[in-house]
Amino acid sequence: MFLFTTTSFAQFRVELGGSWGIPTGSFSESASSGFGGYIEPKIGITNQWEVGVYVAGLGFRDPVSLLFSLPVGINYVVPIQATGTYYILQGKVTPYVGARAGVLVGNALSDIAPTLNNLFDLETESGTRFAFTPNVGLLAGRFDIGLNYNIARDFSFFQLSMGVNIGKKRDY
């Protein structure tokens, strides 16, 4: 019975959007605000629950190049995470809470030191980190606005995202 109910409800859609990130913690020492885009295929398993996969790319400008107007470098973060979303109310404007868990692949400029050959010699810290991301937001028709906090060692940041859903519209 449960399998029949889940299968008959399943709704597939894809969310495409852009986001703005604000680094926190040690990441804020090597990055200023950044922008990027994301794709999130989702499937509704009940009227209030969805699961999916979130893949994004964000580029953050380093604060030294902003201060001196130099084209020094870009920090980047690529989240690849499984998602779960719970829609609190049903209606034209639907608030939700959710979480993502997975990895962040990225690099962060960690030190800037003068050398004789170059004005700046950049050292980077790169790698893959486990990340947990709680999120809240509003879904209005096909449009979604959300606030996330990506928690990962060396790459934590707040993220404001705005997207549009393509595919089957949620049943209210």
Image (spheres, helix red, strand yellow):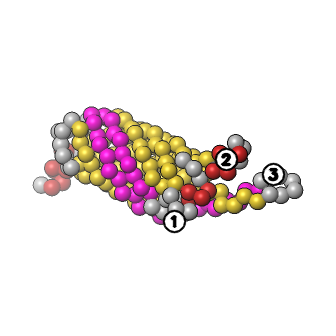
Say whether residue 28 is left or right of residue 81: right
Q: Is residue 152 above or below residue 14?
A: below
Residue 67: image tag: 2
Specify whether residue 73 is in view. Answer: no
Residue with the most extreme left position: 1
Q: Is residue 61 above or below residue 130?
A: above
Most common SS among magenta residues: strand
Q: Of the two numbered discs 2 and 1 on the same chain, state the one appearing first in sequence.
A: 2
Say whether residue 4 is left or right of residue 123: left
Q: Is residue 23 magenta?
A: no
Q: Which residues are magenta?
A: 121-150
- Report which residue position mark 1 lands on: 153
**Tags 2 and 1 in contact by the CB under 8 Å rule?**
no
**Tags 3 and 1 in contact by the CB under 8 Å rule?**
no
Q: Which percent across, then down, holds residue 91?
A: 18, 39
Q: Is residue 135 magenta?
A: yes
Kind of residue indicated by mark 1: Arg
Q: Which percent across, then down, holds residue 114?
A: 80, 57
Q: Identify which residue is drawn at 35% across, 41% down.
A: 145
Residue with the most extreme right position: 116
